[in-house]
Image: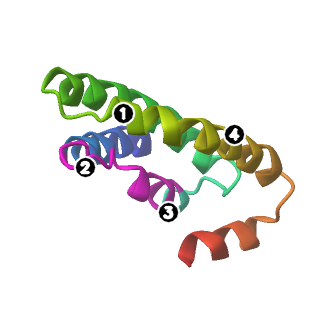
Amino acid sequence: MEQLIILAGVFFVVSTLFSMVGMGGGILYVPILLFAGYNMQTAPGISLILILGTSLAALRNFSKNNLVDWKLAFIIDPPTDIMAFVGGYYSSSVPDNILKGILAG
């Protein structure tokens, strides 16, 4: 339980700071979850839920201030959605160490 409270605090800070620059914290969520002991198949799913919430909140604020290029977004979004589905589908069949290697670059 203590670990969950610490994770919540860390994610609170990360999402606040990173959403100000349009990143939502996703670049740090998976490594933090791996450090906390979650496996490479579970961590991205948790990260995506966190990103969804922060992205929707940030999008609302960016949109309200007319800082979203909707035309560009609607052109780029469909292919990324399709490939995100494909990547998520196949991630469960890729060994943990290979996924960590991809993450590490």
The quadrant of the image that shows the N terminus is top left
Q: CA distance from mark 4 to mark 1?
A: 18 Å
Residue type at mark 3 is Phe
User: Is the residue under label 3 in contact with that under label 1 (CB below 8 Å)?
Assistant: no
Depth check, mark 1 against mark 3: the one in front is: 1
Q: Which tag, 2 or 4, sits closer to the chain's start? A: 2
Does residue 1 appear anywhere in the picture?
Answer: no
Q: Is residue 91 above or below residue 5?
A: below
Depth check, mark 4 against mark 3: the one in front is: 4
Q: CA distance from mark 1 to mark 3?
A: 23 Å
Q: Which residue is mark 4?
A: 82
Q: Which tag, 4 or 1, sits closer to the chain's start? A: 1
Q: Position of residue 93 (x, y in %)?
A: 87, 55
Q: Nearer the viewer, residue 16 or 1?
A: 16
Q: Is residue 68 above or below residue 80?
A: above
User: Is the residue under label 3 in contact with that under label 4 (CB below 8 Å)?
Assistant: no
